[in-house]
Image (cartoon, helix red, strand yellow):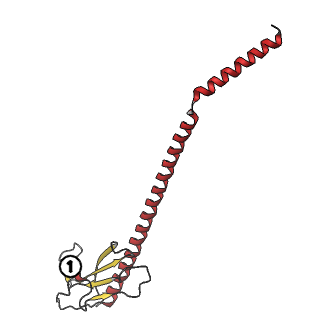
Amino acid sequence: MDIRTKRFHRMQARRNASAKLRSDQKGAVLAIGLILLAVLTLWGVQAMRSNLSQERMAFNMRDRNVAFQAAEAALRVGEVNGPFDSSGVALADPMNWGAGEETGTLVDFDGDLSADPKYHVGPPQYVRVGIVIPPEYRLIYPIGAQAQGSQPGSIVILQSGFEPAN
């Protein structure tokens, strides 16, 4: 056998070994690629869900903030408009928020609200002020305000005590 023939047989043996290795793989690269693709898809879906959840939280926070500002504005209107009567007669129940002269509605609030903010002025009460002896009492009116954001479920209720100027 000459040198050329030996070389040819060695090259043929290498080709056969390489072909045997290729036939032993039987799609392992395909299976690994599919697994990686599935993992990346699940990761992308989870990232989208997380992003949607954060958007909902930001919207709810904004909605509550707008409702809070509307209730604060209604509270201030209630402090300015009254009614402030020193007779001590009980005013309408604030639970129905809208019946009677003592409850007012703030209609000119600039915001995306599902309902107009309302306020209620309660009967005056004597409240002790400070810790001095003899005790000092002042006539304080409780004022409550209610507002809803753009969603009916985002309700904010605030209350303050107000002493009108004599």
Q: Residue at x 57, y 34 (%)?
A: 27
Q: Position of residue 52 (x, y in %)?
A: 46, 60
For the residue carrying disc 1, how many other residues have a C-alpha within 10 Å: few (<14), some (14-19), or many (20+)? few
- The type of residue carrying mark 1 is Val
Relative horizontal placement of residue 159, taking residue 135 as reference (left or right)? right
Q: Residue at x 30, y 88 (%)?
A: 104
User: In terms of depth relative to the viewer, which is nearer, 13 or 88?
Assistant: 13
**Is the N terminus in the top left, top right, bottom left or bottom right quadrant?**
top right
User: In terms of depth relative to the viewer, which is nearer, 26 or 76?
Assistant: 26
Q: Position of residue 128 (x, y in %)?
A: 20, 77
Q: Which residue is mark 1?
A: 127
Secondary element at tag 1: strand
Q: How many marks?
A: 1
28 versus 114 height, above or below: above
Determine the residue located farthest toward the top in the rendered image. 1
Q: Position of residue 158 (x, y in %)?
A: 31, 76
Q: Residue at x 23, y 82 (%)?
A: 96
